[in-house]
């Protein structure tokens, strides 16, 4: 199955937020660590609500977390 | 590994081993033309073993991943569950009619193979055939869970 055409900066944002662990992020958005890992590795596209929650945790706009890969 | 993935491994493993043994023995007996009188006891024992092992191993894995045990499934887990349920339902829709038609076609053969109690043998084989379709569906559901979790790991 092809990965979704969406990239994300979750790894960098976690690093910028005092090396927040995947488990800490998962706890704050009500998900499992495995799901956060899947989102971070671009193996799963989260719902819009989950995407907003992630952005809220980092205190940034959703567009700073997720980017649509434009087809050439 | 997520708690729900561990549960899927536990369910698949136990179901394959315990019910593989039960149905393996049952169909060997059917092929030999003699169904053991203790079939019901064997069924109850297998059911008991399944329950004890499922509860025990799920509790053990839950204790090891205590943090995840109380959490409701998140959206990815719900999606995996829904996919497995949908596929399992379609499989059941396919297997039950196949089992029933095969059973109806084989009724004459079963009656001649079990002259002592033809009606009883047909009923027992039909019941076990239907039960086996449910077990197969459950194993496939668990395998879909495992594969889905591995694909996102």
Image (spheres, coloured by chain):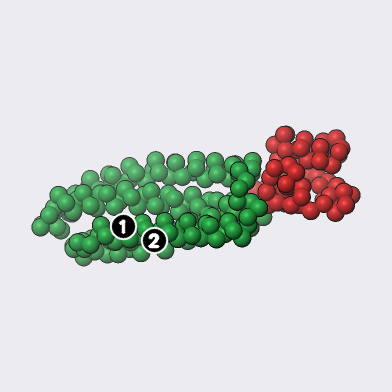
Disc 2 to disc 1, C-alpha distance: 9 Å
Q: Quadrant of the C terminus of chain B?
A: bottom right
Q: Is residue B142 left or right of residue A18?
A: left
Which residue is at the front of the view, B4 or B128?
B4
Number of numbered markers: 2
Circle 2 packing at 10 Å, graded few (<14), some (14-19), many (20+), is some
Can residue B113 be seen from the camera position used here? yes
Element type at marker 1?
Answer: helix
Q: Residue at x 23, y 45 (%)?
A: B104
- In primary-sequence order, the first of circles 2 and 1 is 1
Q: Which mark is residue A3?
A: none
Numbered disc 2: what chain? B
Whether residue B9 is visible to the viewer of this picture, yes or no, is no
Q: Which residue matches tag 1? A: B44
Q: Is B146 situated left or right of B37 in this image?
A: right
Q: What colour do you see for chain B?
A: green
Q: From the image, tell me which residue sits under label 2.
A: B49
Splitting the image into 4 quarters, where does residue B3 fall?
A: bottom right
> Where does residue B141 sit, x and y in percent of width and height?
49, 49
The residue lying at 42 percent from left, 63 percent from top is B17
**Callout 2: helix, strand or loop?**
helix
Instruction: Check the picture and name the quadrant holding the N terminus of chain B.
Output: bottom right
């Amino acid at each position: 199955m092809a990965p979704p055409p969406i990239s994300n900066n979750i790894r960098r944002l976690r690093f910028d937020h005092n090396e927040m662990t995947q488990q800490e992020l998962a706890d704050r958005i009500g998900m499992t660590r495995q799901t956060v890992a899947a989102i971070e590795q671009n193996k799963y596209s989260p719902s819009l609500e989950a995407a907003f929650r992630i952005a809220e945790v980092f205190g940034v706009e959703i567009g700073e977390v997720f980017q649509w890969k434009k087809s050439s | 590994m997520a708690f729900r993935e561990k549960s899927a491994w536990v369910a698949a493993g136990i179901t394959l081993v315990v019910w593989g043994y039960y149905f393996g023995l049952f169909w060997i007996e059917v092929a030999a033309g003699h169904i053991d009188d203790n079939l019901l006891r064997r069924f109850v024992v297998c059911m008991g073993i399944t329950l004890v092992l499922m509860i025990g191993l799920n509790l053990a894995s839950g204790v090891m991943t205590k943090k995840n045990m109380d959490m409701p499934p998140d959206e990815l887990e719900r999606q995996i569950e829904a996919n497995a349920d949908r596929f399992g339902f379609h499989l059941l829709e396919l297997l039950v009619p196949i089992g029933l038609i095969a059973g109806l076609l084989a009724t004459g053969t079963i009656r001649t193979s079990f002259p002592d109690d033809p009606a009883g043998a047909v009923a027992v084989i039909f019941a076990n055939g239907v039960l086996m379709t449910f077990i197969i569906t459950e194993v496939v559901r668990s395998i879909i869970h495992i594969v889905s979790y591995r694909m996102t790991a």
